[in-house]
Structures are given as structure tokens and as C-alpha cells.
């Protein structure tokens, strides 16, 4: 406060007891704190310090454990990303099966259905069929190459069309699917691996070998079940399947018989 305006009185000698130090006079008033207003009460400094400390600790904690604020940070997968596709072995037969599916859907599905379930009065089921799941493709490839007629026992439960003398036959599908060993192999691989079927893949070489003995047979000469049952079902089993027939004990014995160094190398290779 500035009291320069009061001083002229003092110097002019006209002091009527009014020239008291205003600051001193008001000191008591100034000491009085204004009435607290609700919501603006003075705050305990210790509490402010405490809260500041908590905020600091909170910040430090988040820096340490926030997981970079990424929602998927704690997912079991590395950083929440889907498992790399490479860890799922790509199906080496995918292209062949796709090829087979295209031919199947264009030709066979008309009668057997896209789902291989067959159609009443038209064609028997392929899903779960003994003919389709046979150990080898030798009978199967003959059916598609030259067709099939007469009563057929498809599996334990289905005897196709006991009244088949009505003449519902399956003609040769060879030309329809493109007339090559590759196409036939693809179609057979497809039907043997679809709809829950468990047959092994069929290679063009297996088709060539299987058809060689009947290369002079006419496409009109549809097979009958009786004829086909004379053909060995086995066919050429892939070498890999033969190797898998060894029991785990036999394989273990073979491993143990190897020199330690070689055995280690194989185990290391396997554990990759
Ligand atoms: C015109 C209808 C028709 C078409 C097209 C057709 N089939 Fe058939 N298929 C039949 C009939 C009918 C039978 C049963 C024949 C019999 O009664 O002897 C049959 C039987 C079969 C069988 C043996 C029985 C079974 O259910 O397993 C197989 C395997 C088969 N077909 C596969 C195929 C494949 C693969 C194609 C395509 C390349 C094909 N068929 C196309 C009508 C058809």
C-alpha cells in the first residue's frame, strides 16, 4: 500500500492525530485470514506432498509394467501376433487336390454330389466308401477309366441299388476329366482325402502302372464288382508308408545300434 498521499499533511503540520501509520493500523485486519469458502479451504501441505509422491510412484510403476499399453502384450502368442504360418506345414498336395476338386465338381459331382454323399437313385456315396478308401488305387482308377455297372457293395452298410438291373451305370469318366494320368491322379487324390476319407495320395505314376495291364480295354467295357475284386486292392504303397510300418521299438533299436556320433546327429536333426 502506498501512503505517499497522507504524508503531505504531516509535513504541513496539520496533524490532527490522524497521521498514524496506516500499515500498522491495518496490520491486525491483514492478519485476519478471509473466511474459508467451501471448496477452497487451505490444503494440508503434507497431503499435497503425499499425493505428489504417489503420482511419481504411479508413473514409475507404469513405465516399468505398462506393457507399452498394448492390449495384446500379455497374450500367450508372441506380442499377440498369430502364429507364423510357416510353423504349420504347408500341404504339399494342395495344388493337386485343388486340381482334382475342380475336375470332380465339374464332372463327378453331378451324380455323386459336391459333398460326396451320393444321390438317391443316381449314384452311391463316396464319403467313407470302401472303394475310395482302399489301400491302393488299382480298383478305383479302373472304375473311373472304364466305368462301373451292376450291383455294388459300397461298404458294410450300403449295397448300391439292389434294383440296379434298371441299368443305372457309371460310364467311363476318362475323357470328361481330361483324359490324362495327371488328371485322374488328381481326382482320386482329391476324393481319397475329402469328406473324412483317409486314402493315401495317388500319383500319375501309380495311375500309369495301374492302367498298363488294361490299356487295350474299351471304354464301353464297364467293370463289374466281381471283376474288380479279382484286382489286387493293394496297389503300389508309397515307400514312406512302408517305412512307417516299423514299430517304435524297432526304430529305437536301429537308432541305438548306430555309432553315438551319428545317433546324436540324427536326434539333433529330428529335434529341429
Ligand atoms: C452319370 C453319373 C455319374 C458320374 C458323372 C460319375 N459317377 Fe461314379 N458312380 C455312378 C453310379 C451310378 C455308380 C454305381 C455303379 C453301379 O451301380 O455299378 C458309381 C460308382 C462309383 C464308385 C464306386 C462306388 C462307390 O460309391 O464308392 C466310385 C468310386 C465312383 N463312382 C467315382 C466317381 C468319380 C471319381 C467320378 C468322376 C470322375 C464319377 N464317379 C462320376 C454314377 C456316376
Image (cartoon, rainbow, N blue to C red):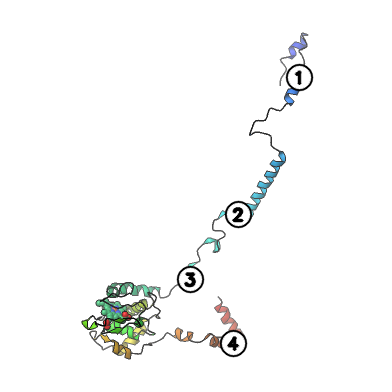
Q: Residue at x 45, y 84 (%)?
A: 241
Q: Residue at x 31, y 86 (%)?
A: 211
Disc 1 target residue: 25
- Whether ligand 1 has any atom under 8 Å from the Cβ at mark 4 is answered as no
User: Residue 124 vs residue 33: left or right?
Assistant: left
Are dots 2 and 4 in contact, CB under 8 Å?
no
User: Residue 30 vs residue 62: left or right?
Assistant: right
State the CA–CA distance, disc 1 to disc 2.
60 Å
Q: Is residue 173 visible?
A: no
Residue 36 in the image: state x and y as whole percent: 67, 30
3 or 4: tag closer to the N-terminus = 3
Of badges 3 and 1, the one in the foreground is: 1
Which element type, helix, strand or loop, lies under badge 1? helix
2 or 4: tag closer to the N-terminus = 2
Q: Quadrant of ligand 1?
A: bottom left
Assign the N terminus to one quadrant of the image.
top right
Image quadrant in which you'd find residue 207: bottom left
Assign the C terminus to one quadrant of the image.
bottom right
Which sits in the foreground, 205 or 163? 163
- Whether ligand 1 has any atom under 8 Å from the Cβ at mark 1 is answered as no
Image quadrant in which you'd find residue 193: bottom left
Q: Residue at x 50, y 66 (%)?
A: 84
Above or below residue 272? Residue 151 is below
Which element type, helix, strand or loop, lies under badge 3? loop
Query: How many neighbours does mark 3 have within 10 angstroms: few (below 14), some (14-19), or many (20 or more)?
Result: few
3 or 1: tag closer to the N-terminus = 1
Disc 3 target residue: 88
Disc 2 target residue: 66
Disc 4 target residue: 256
Amino acid at each position: 500500500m502506498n501512503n505517499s498521499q497522507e504524508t503531505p499533511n504531516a509535513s504541513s503540520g496539520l496533524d490532527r492525530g490522524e497521521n498514524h501509520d496506516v500499515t500498522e493500523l491495518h496490520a491486525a485486519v491483514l492478519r485476519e485470514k478471509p473466511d474459508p469458502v467451501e471448496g477452497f479451504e487451505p490444503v494440508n501441505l503434507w497431503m499435497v506432498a503425499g499425493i505428489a509422491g504417489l503420482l511419481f510412484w504411479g508413473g514409475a510403476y507404469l513405465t516399468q509394467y505398462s506393457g507399452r499399453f498394448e492390449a495384446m502384450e500379455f497374450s500367450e502368442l508372441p506380442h499377440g501376433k498369430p502364429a507364423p504360418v510357416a510353423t504349420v506345414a504347408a500341404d504339399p498336395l494342395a495344388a493337386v487336390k485343388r486340381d482334382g476338386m475342380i475336375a470332380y465338381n465339374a464332372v463327378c459331382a453331378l451324380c455323386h454330389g459336391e459333398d460326396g454323399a451320393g444321390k438317391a437313385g443316381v449314384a452311391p456315396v463316396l464319403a467313407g466308401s470302401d472303394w475310395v478308401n482302399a489301400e491302393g488305387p488299382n480298383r478305383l482308377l479302373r472304375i473311373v477309366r472304364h466305368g462301373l455297372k451292376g450291383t455294388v457293395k459300397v461298404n458294410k452298410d450300403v449295397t448300391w441299388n439292389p434294383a440296379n438291373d434298371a441299368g443305372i451305370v457309371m460310364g467311363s469318366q476318362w475323357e470328361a476329366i481330361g483324359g490324362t494320368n495327371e488328371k485322374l491322379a488328381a481326382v482320386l487324390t482329391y476324393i481319397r482325402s475329402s469328406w473324412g476319407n483317409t486314402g493315401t495320395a495317388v500319383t500319375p505314376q501309380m495311375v500309369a502302372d495301374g492302367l498298363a495291364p488294361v490299356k487295350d480295354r474299351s471304354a464301353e467295357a464297364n467293370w463289374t464288382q466281381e471283376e474288380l475284386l479279382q484286382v489286387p486292392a493293394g496297389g503300389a504303397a508309397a515307400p514312406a508308408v512302408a517305412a512307417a510300418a516299423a514299430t517304435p521299438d524297432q526304430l529305437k533299436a536301429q537308432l541305438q545300434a548306430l555309432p553315438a556320433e551319428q545317433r546324436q546327429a540324427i536326434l539333433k536333426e529330428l529335434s529341429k
